[in-house]
Amino acid sequence: MRGRRDTPWWVITSDVTLFNVSMVVAYWTRYELEWFRDISYYHQLSAYLPFGVLFTLLMLVTFRMDGVYRRWAGRQWLDQTYRIINATSKSTVVMLAVTFLLQPLQYSRLLLIEAGIITVVLLGVSRAIQNVVIGHLHNQGVGALRTIIVGAGEVGRTVMRTVVARPGLGYRIVGFVDDNPEKGTGNIGRFDGLGPIHNLPRLIEEQDVDEVIITLPWM
């Protein structure tokens, strides 16, 4: 069976890009638009390059600490956004502490706060788009785990309904087996009965199955 990564590489790449885009947009809003407060000194964008690098590194560390990339597939948008807000807040606080200790009079701490807010907004929108696209691809069978359900009882049916309702979970059910011959040979909606349980080893090979979900009662 093939392994499954928590987070695709392109999601992390997209996040890193948006971290840096947030710094650029924050610089523009602070020095060009002068939102919230007029500026009394001016710095080139290049002066904030070290802070951009530090911000990116801090975000990756806090994302790992807060589990932003852990169990990524199928996580609800609100949960994703909540973790992003927590990680971004921590990174922003550290950045403010660094500017206070090193150059409290030369660099705009308001810019760093704006960068944190913009990061949350951009990543929130990004996650929403990613979830829609990935859900559509999984519905088409692209990148989804081919799965067999063991058990056609109420628990098994609940799993099937959940997979249909939440394509972002990344499962594609190829069918189900059951210890009851009558249940194992019938169909449940779009899902095909593949026979009794002893067919499972053969079906795993023939159907190129990635995961098996067992829903039989404990007895």
Image (cartoon, rainbow, N blue to C red):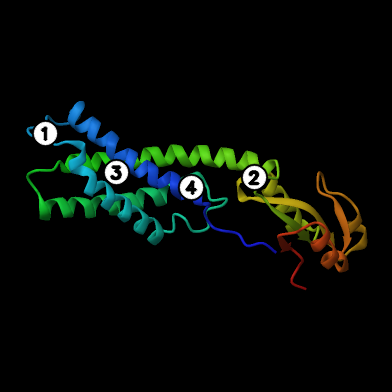
Q: Quick one: SS at disc 4?
A: helix
Residue 57 in the image, given as x and y percentages of width and height: 32, 55
Decide which of tag 3 and tag 1 comes sooner along the chain.
Answer: 1
Look at mark 4 in the image and give the residue it sits on: 11
Q: Nearer the viewer, mark 1 or mark 2?
A: 1
- Left or right of 203, for residue 104: left
Look at mark 3 in the image and give the residue it sits on: 116
Residue 213 in the image, given as x and y percentages of width and height: 72, 62
Q: Amino acid at mark 3?
A: Gly
Q: Amino acid at mark 2?
A: Pro
Report if residue 149 is visible in the image. yes
- Left or right of 82, for residue 113: left
Please tell me which residue is depicted at 29% across the width and 54% down the height of the picture.
Answer: 90
Q: CA distance from mark 2 to mark 4?
A: 18 Å
- Left or right of 175, for residue 54: left
Mark 1 touching mark 2, by CB under 8 A?
A: no
Look at mark 1 in the image and give the residue it sits on: 42
Q: CA distance from mark 3 to mark 4?
A: 19 Å
Q: Amino acid at mark 4?
A: Val
Q: Nearer the viewer, mark 3 or mark 4?
A: 4
Decide which of tag 2 and tag 4 comes sooner along the chain.
Answer: 4
Look at mark 2 in the image and give the residue it sits on: 167
Q: CA distance from mark 3 to mark 2?
A: 31 Å
Q: Amino acid at mark 1?
A: Tyr
Query: 10 Å neighbourhood of mark 1: few (<14), some, or many (≥20)?
Result: few
Q: CA distance from mark 4 to mark 1?
A: 35 Å
Decide which of tag 3 and tag 4 comes sooner along the chain.
Answer: 4
Decide which of tag 3 and tag 2 comes sooner along the chain.
Answer: 3
Q: Quadrant of residue 153?
A: bottom right
Q: Quick one: SS at disc 3?
A: helix
